[in-house]
Structure formats: structure tokens, C-alpha cells
Image (tube, rainbow, N blue to C red):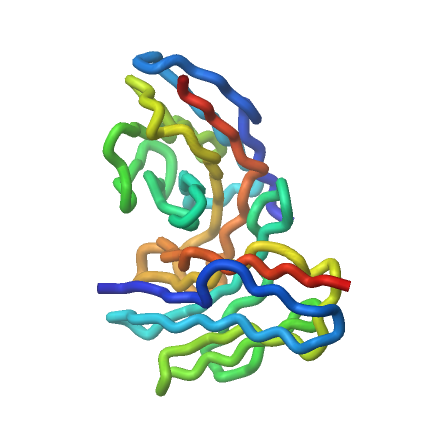
């Protein structure tokens, strides 16, 4: 069945180091992939989403590339900032229903 | 940006009691969703709706009902609340399915069932 798998649990980084959070998916349909970010005591909000034309989405220094051959949509940033500390969800849209399937989430903690 | 509000923001309920969580969106989105968020489980879809009068079961609908009386409002109803329903509940809204279907989340409701 449709599913999404993320880097599990907590990822701790030192400020200035690169960020990579893994996301792989299993989907019956051609998927649309999303990354949502949730800061402490806030609502999840969209960080970026995949395009249909192979463009690489970018936002706030984060980018992700959809690789259909490996069923992946890893989130990357060249240099972590303290303000990047948050919970990150990878999600994909199932078929034509508007339903999102979320991964379990990865907590990123950036330390000085 | 889409505006989604939820009420109440915090709720303490007793086991066996009835709880209603309300959600309002002001951006005329067709789709609305109810999720619960629990550590180790991420965001799980409870019910969703394609428009006024429509409700659909999500992935974990047992113990919950939903109501969509209008385009703007979507309620989640716990007829007989249980401690296992203690969680943070998020409502979200979005437009028609497709690659532009960003979901906009409300601020969440923290529910404690004693």
C-alpha cells in the first residue's frame, strides 16, 4: 500500500553544517511530494512541494529533488541555522483524493 | 495565506462525555480535514470532507464522527470520549486535488480526556 518513510526520531546538528532529512515513498500513483515544517507549539505549514516538471523546489534555503527512480524526496540545506530547529514531515498526495499520507516526522535540533 | 481557526484551543473532558471540536476556514476551500498528532505516530487522518454536507472516513475514524454543515465549518465529534483520545487535533483545509493542493492547518486543539 501507499506509505512514506522518513529519517526517524531526532537529528542533532551543529549550526552551519549541512542538513539532509531522508524521505522515501511507496505509491501506486505518480506522486506529489511535500515537506511540512512544524515549529514548537505551532501548526504544521508547507515548506515545499514537488513539481510535475522536474523543477527543484526551494524555500528558505531548503530544497528537495524528487527522484522517481529511487522513490525519494530528501530535504536538504547547505547550512543549518538555529531557527531551523523544528519537526519536519514528509507527505505525499494519494491518487486523486486530496488525502495526504504523512511520515512519522523527523525532529531537527540545531545547536550553537 | 489561508486562515483556519479552531475552537476550543484547550479542552479537558471526562471519560464517556461528549466533545465537539470546531474548525472554521475563510478561504472558500473545498476540502477540509481532521488529524490527530501523537508522538511516534505523526499526523493521522481521522475524517475529511469535499464540501458542505460531505464527510469521508480517514485512516483512523473509529470513535469519531464529523460534520460539515457549510463550506466554512467542519466539526469533529467524540460521542463517548476515552483517555486514548487524548491528543492534539489539527484541522486543515485545501483546494481541489492536484499538485497545487497545499493544506493549511489550524493552530490545533489540545484535548485531555480524564
Residue B50, position as x, y percentages in the image: 35, 44
**Quarter of the figure that contains the C terminus of chain B:** top left
Residue at image point 37% right, 46% down: B44
Q: Is residue A42 left or right of residue A49?
A: right
Check the image and report above or below for A8 versus A67: above
Where, by quadrant of the figure, is residue A30 drawn? bottom left
Q: Which residue lies furthest to the right in this view?
A: A112
Check the image and report above or below for A110 versus A71: above
The residue lying toward the viewer, choosing from A2 and B25, is A2
Report if residue B85 is visible in the image: yes
Residue at image point 28% right, 41% down: B60
Where, by quadrant of the figure, is residue B98 drawn? bottom left
Residue at image point 39% right, 73% down: A24
The residue lying toward the viewer, choosing from A76 and B83, is B83
Residue at image point 63% right, 50% down: A39
Residue A28, position as x, y percentages in the image: 24, 70
Report if residue A36 is visible in the image: no
Q: How many circles with numbers are drawn on the protein?
A: 0
Residue B92, position as x, y percentages in the image: 48, 43
Where, by quadrant of the figure, is residue A12 drawn? bottom right
Residue A73, position as x, y percentages in the image: 46, 75
Amino acid at each position: 500500500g501507499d506509505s512514506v518513510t522518513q529519517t526517524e526520531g531526532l537529528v542533532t546538528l551543529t549550526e552551519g553544517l549541512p542538513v539532509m532529512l531522508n524521505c522515501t515513498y511507496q505509491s501506486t500513483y505518480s506522486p506529489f511530494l511535500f515537506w511540512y515544517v512544524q515549529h514548537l507549539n505551532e501548526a504544521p505549514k508547507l515548506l515545499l512541494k514537488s513539481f510535475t516538471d522536474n523543477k527543484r523546489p526551494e524555500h528558505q534555503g531548503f530544497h528537495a529533488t524528487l527522484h522517481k527512480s529511487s522513490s525519494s524526496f530528501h530535504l536538504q540545506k547547505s547550512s543549518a541555522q538555529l531557527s531551523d530547529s523544528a519537526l519536519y514531515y514528509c507527505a505525499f498526495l494519494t491518487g486523486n483524493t486530496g488525502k495526504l499520507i504523512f511520515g512519522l516526522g523527523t525532529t531537527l535540533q540545531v545547536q550553537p | 495565506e489561508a486562515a483556519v481557526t479552531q475552537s476550543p484551543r484547550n479542552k479537558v473532558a471526562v471519560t464517556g462525555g461528549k466533545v465537539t471540536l470546531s474548525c472554521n476556514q475563510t478561504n472558500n476551500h473545498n476540502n477540509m480535514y481532521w488529524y490527530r498528532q501523537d508522538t511516534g505516530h505523526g499526523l493521522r487522518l481521522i475524517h475529511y470532507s469535499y464540501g458542505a454536507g460531505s464527510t469521508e472516513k480517514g485512516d483512523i475514524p473509529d470513535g469519531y464522527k464529523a460534520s460539515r454543515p457549510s463550506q466554512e465549518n467542519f466539526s469533529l465529534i467524540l460521542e463517548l470520549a476515552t483517555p486514548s483520545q487524548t491528543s492534539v487535533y489539527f484541522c486543515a483545509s485545501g483546494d481541489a486535488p492536484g499538485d497545487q493542493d497545499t493544506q493549511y492547518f489550524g493552530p490545533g486543539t489540545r484535548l485531555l480526556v480524564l
